[in-house]
Amino acid sequence: MSDTEPRAPRRMVGTRRARLALAVAPDHLTVVRLARGVPGARPVEVLQCTLAPPGKQSWPELEDALRELSDTLGISGGSVDVALLRRLGHAKVIALPPVRRSELSALVRRNAHRHFAVRDEPLVADAARLPGSRAGALVPTLAGCAPTALVEAVTAACQAAGFHIGRIVPGTVALAEGARSLAPAARRGRVAVIGCGPDAVDLVQVEDGTPRLFQPLAHPSRVGDALRALEADGAALTGIVVCGNGPEADGVRMTLLEDLEFSTRLLRADAVERVPAEAVAALGAARAGSRAPVLLPDAVRAERAKAARRRTLVLSAAAGVMLILAAWLHLWGIQREAEAVQARRREIAPRVKTALEARANVEGVRSRLATIAALEGGAQGWTREIAALARALPDSAHLRTFVADSAGLRLAGIARSASAVVPALEASPAFARVSLAAPVRWEQGDSGERFDVAAMLQRAAARNRRRQ
């Protein structure tokens, strides 16, 4: 295995696990070591080696290369994502009916030989819906396929070397995703991504970061013609990204710089020019998400579906337990609060009872005061009349009975001269219509004459006159 960049001296096999990305070609392997736990991390190390072509059912040379890689990097397994380069993995954009993702994948698998010009052998295929408008009743779809035996051989080799397989992606799709990750300018507009390897040149048209066209080129010298053909079929290109660090990539960049038509649209990015184009594709395999078709054997898909169902059941059970625990804690908290409230109520009950009794007493007093005030407001005032009566009566007269109402009064008493009582009351402004209510008489033992006089109050007489 030979390094394309300086790296640390050889280390013994350790127990550390690593995150790797592979670009697999029929005759060579490119390995990119990525920083674990860092989304979108740049390559930490890039290694390349030659491989013997795969067999019909297995690829022992790939397994040996991965074991040697583990020994070289001092790692013990980890996760790996794979990009299948030209002649191993295929991708194209096709128009399919608008169905769900699972049905879309099944539809592509059933008709893979109709969409791809490949040998008549079992294929692993998948598809991902592309954003964009529909073409009538159909929608653009990114589809990919690879021979089933090859995918199973790659999966078996990775697993035998101690690596967990993540995803397997067609190389051209991974190239577009890698260029999008390393060259931010390629994420917007209509961009041409060119991957220049030692024996292959791939052209991918990308619109706003989404692959739209895949075109293999026979030779780097055909790049200019291919770009002009792209512009003739659609809008002008807003940028061109050339991936690779070999002489082929340098030659393509020089040709585009010398071409006045494309020189100003060449997007230079050191990240895609320091590493081979295969490394860019490997990185794209690690960064590809739901936008890319994933080529995995049916056994791996079934195992992952089963694991997903187990995780769903475990999470559902955990959620149920957490819900019950939360409900119990809530009820326990309510019970504690209720007990605290009851204890506080028992504590303040005597004071509350005393306060309620005092309140009842106050309310009773207030009610009596209100009753007295009402009675006082509705009662006839006699202070003035009694004072006038006292002033009007002769000094020798004294009363024995006194009866009064709102209309007048009647009084009986004894006077030295009863005939002097009536004129005295008539002279008072407080009384009117004064008259004797009974004959004057004298009884044995009296000090004077007995009189019985009736009189109307002056205010009552005035009220009667107003009514008349």
Image (cartoon, rainbow, N blue to C red):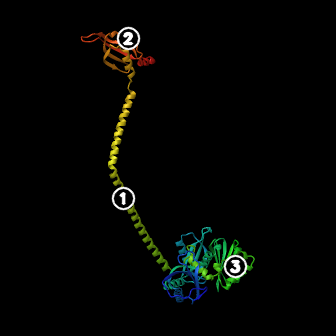
Where residue 106 appears, as percent x and y from the top left, is 53, 75
Where residue 391 appears, as percent x and y from the top left, is 38, 16
Pointer 2 residue: 423
Mark earlier in primary sequence (2, 1): 1
Cβ atoms under marks 3 and 2 closer than 8 Å: no
Q: In the picture, residue 456 is in which quadrant?
A: top left
Q: In the picture, residue 423 is in which quadrant?
A: top left
Q: In the picture, residue 105 is in which quadrant?
A: bottom right
Name the residue rendered at 66%, 85% in the picture: 246
Q: Secondary structure at mark 3?
A: helix
Q: Amino acid at mark 2?
A: Pro
Which circle marks residue 336 in the picture? Answer: 1
Distance from disc 1 to disc 3, alpha carbons, whole Å, reads 78 Å
Packing grade of label 2 (10 A; few <14, some 14-19, many >=20) is some
- Camera-near label (3 vs 2) is 2
Which circle marks residue 226 in the picture? Answer: 3
Where residue 118 appears, as percent x and y from the top left, is 59, 82
Q: Amino acid at mark 3?
A: Ala
Q: Amino acid at mark 1?
A: Arg
Q: Secondary structure at mark 1?
A: helix
Would you say residue 218 is visible in this rendering?
Answer: no
Instruction: Tell whether 438 sits left or right of 180.
Output: left
